[in-house]
Amino acid sequence: MTELTAPNVVASSTRSDRRRKILQNLLRGERPYMLYIAFVILLVVFSLSSPWFLSVDNFLNIGRQTTLVSIIAVGMTFIIIARQIDLSVASTLALSGMAAALAMSQINNSWIVGAVAGLGTGALVGLLNGILTTQLSIPSFLVTLGSLSMARGLAMMVTNTKPVIITNETYFAIFGEGTFLGIPVPIAWTLAAMIIGILLLHYNVFGRRIYAVGGNPTAALYSGINTKRITTAAFVLTGTLAGLAALVLSARSHAARPDVVQGMELDVIAAVILGGCSLFGGRGYILGTLFGSLIIGTLNNGLVLLGVSSPMQLVIKGAIIVAAVAFTKR
Amino acid sequence: MELSGSGTAEPGTSTSLVMVSGINKRFGGVRALRDVNLEVRAGEVHALLGENGAGKSTLIKILSGVHALDSGTIEIAGKPVEFDSPAKSREAGIAVVYQDLSLVESLSVADNLLLGREPRARFGFVRQRALMARAEAFLNELGIPLDTRATVGSLPFAYRQMTEIAKALMGEVRLLILDEPTSSLTSDEVRILFDAIGKATRRGVGVIYVTHRLNEVFEISQRVTVLRDGANAGTFVTAETDMKRLVNAIVGTDRSVSTSPRVEPAAKRQLDPSPVLSLSNVSNDRLRAVDLSVLKGEIHGLAGLIGSGRTEILETVFGLRPLESGAIEIEGRRWLPKGPADAIEQGIALVPEDRHVQGLVLDHSIERNVTLPRIPHFSRWGWMQQRAAARRAETAIARLSVKAPGAFSLVRTLSGGNQQKVVFGKWNDPRPRVLLLDEPTVGVDVGAREEIYAVIRNAVRDGSGVLVVSSDLVELIELCDRISVIVNGRVARTLARGEIDDAEELHHLLQMYQASGPGQLQELPA
């Protein structure tokens, strides 16, 4: 075996290499700092133009408003890194919420039953998306376009479009209205999803494989990676997180409604792309997604505070998203 | 006899159509072309020969405007031209038919021929009848028997290729370049193709015909230019030369034998006679009753033309291609490959043909790439042991002397040779039982090639069995203990070291088997 000629030099250079890499993973992925600059500019502009913007309460508000998008965007990050897309997340959320509420109303009004039913339904939709995409080789765009429609339709069918009231106080406390270590639980759940996402993507075997499958599916296959199973797992993760978002939403509104969050998948995808994921796969990071989602949340919040009309909000939001992606693109 | 330069072959007969003089092209540190000359006359089929990496593709890409030249000139009908884009080359009358076709499969032959220049009525509507008529008239004039209404996707391959050639000939074409047009054609289809070429040359079009098949050269070309290591190795009048001389020019009699310490021939190394891999009667869609064995510590070569089934043998062993009948044994135990993961579990490793597509994730680091086949080995309870992974990458970099700033450098930033070493790095630890190599040194500079040879030799010294596919016959002769000749999905013959002396002889043998089919040829040509 050939030995390293200068082990100390090599080791120290790789140590700083490694530190740089971890920093890269957590802070900026492989993109420049544009994302953070954009976020700071946004904060400064809104702080200067609205007296109500810069306050703890308002930031908690933004946090709460972005919860649903942020939680699901964690899963979407995995999907987009793996070169897939999931358009069905908003419908999955609606269906999971109905499942949770109905299960509770049928079985002992138990919050555990509700949670399991909600998460399980989300996971099941994800599993179906994954299996159809990988086993039948249908592009996930089409598969999830179909399940977007089917899941929403099912959510409406089960109660004939009526909402289901939830009465379990523990459920409200755990998922919607309580606090955990002083943090409102929706924000706590968001942080939990983020941390799990970071661990899975950057420190787990699963994340390695996701990056490889998205970076070059053929090379991943030739390296013995079960690309179908990995892709399916990403869909299951995303579906489950849509289920978690459904629990948070229904606990906050004390009811599950079949027509909630229509079109939210676009905000989720925008957050992930803003956050630095490449639509061509193989590149992206969770913290970027968090900031992407915060930018969208801050935009929504700030434009309301400035009294911008809601049609105009849509126009400005869309333009800023496109501009931000254009600037952060390398 | 060899003629130096071009133009002296048949002085004064016809005027030169395209004159390429003194072309140089460099890719990074590699000199792809050195003072290359080529002259093509109107109405001539000019064959362009050379091994993989000899510079044929680079020359074609320069003529077609894909690459810019570093120095040298191109003249068309006496006028100097400069191409900075494929469109410019096309404008000058040069049309290229590549191996991978550029047709829209869902459209008809006529639609494809006139794509982008459809006869139009007002408001951009296509005059369908006029389009059909024009396409038909053109094909009749060329004498190419194609149904203009047929959907291209439904046509057999040869007819698609003819459509492609016809398309290339639409408009003002003076030079037609065909890049290995027959590699996937049957002999009947080759006939049809040659007819079409003949019709083109009768119209005064000059043709550059790139091929690996020497028998075709004698059939269709008037002159031949051979490239070797990026330089001219001779231009010949086809009628005045023979296969032996061409092979000499292609292979080169002066190519120096490797300078690195070479492994003694198998006999002296006292190979363990037990095979680590054996295939008996292995058949599937591309292979027909393949019998083959690789001994422990042996380098076994697979020689054959592109499309002969060489690569498919490796793919079948690696579980990428289903085994339909026959048996595979690993160290004497019967084993049915279920997929790459299963093959890796058995200690089989594959360095695939196309490292960019199959071997590497280019936008990822060296560390990510080398750990890819054995991710679970660098984890505990599913969590990555970042240090172990980084150490693995550092060892691979040191052992294979990959020239890179560090373990986290992106693979895309490395040179071809270093990228290939990273692919080897995926498999060097633990030592594979069977190492499958597909064109291990394509696109690799000379220095890195020697280093890769050393890696291969180290692997067999440590007891791996190696099965290597290569189009570089010198490489096969240099490396292998035995060489199997593959023709049409079969092993036509297995040669032991000593039965064959040099690449030239092997080249002859391949050509003869290809021309006559396996089994019919008894003696080696003189």
Image (cartoon, helix red, strand yellow):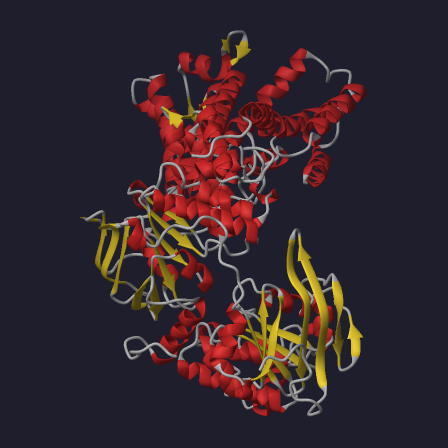
Residue at x 76%, y 82% (from the top left corner)? B77
Please determine whether, in this image, residue A149 is positioned above or below residue B504: above
Q: Quadrant of the C terminus of chain B?
A: bottom left
Please name whichever residue, B441 or A176, is drawn nearer the observer in this view of the structure: B441
Classify residue B341 as left or right of residue B351.
left
Horizontal and vertical percent position of residue A63:
60, 20
User: Could you say where residue A291 lies in the image, as x and y percent from the top left?
Assistant: 62, 27
State whether residue A3 is above or below residue B266.
above
Residue A141 at x, y = what percent?
A: 49, 47
Name the residue nearer the viewer: B70 or B161: B70
User: Could you say which quadrant of the image residue A17 lies in?
Assistant: top right
Quarter assignment of residue B227: bottom right
Rendered residue at 71%/31% (across/down): A34
Q: Position of residue B351 (x, y in %)?
A: 42, 49
User: Between B431 and A196, which is closer to the camera in this rendering?
Assistant: B431
Q: Residue furthest left?
A: B333
Name the side, left or right, on which B286 lies relative to B14.
Answer: left
Residue farthest to the top, as pictured: A182
Q: Quadrant of residue B22?
A: bottom right
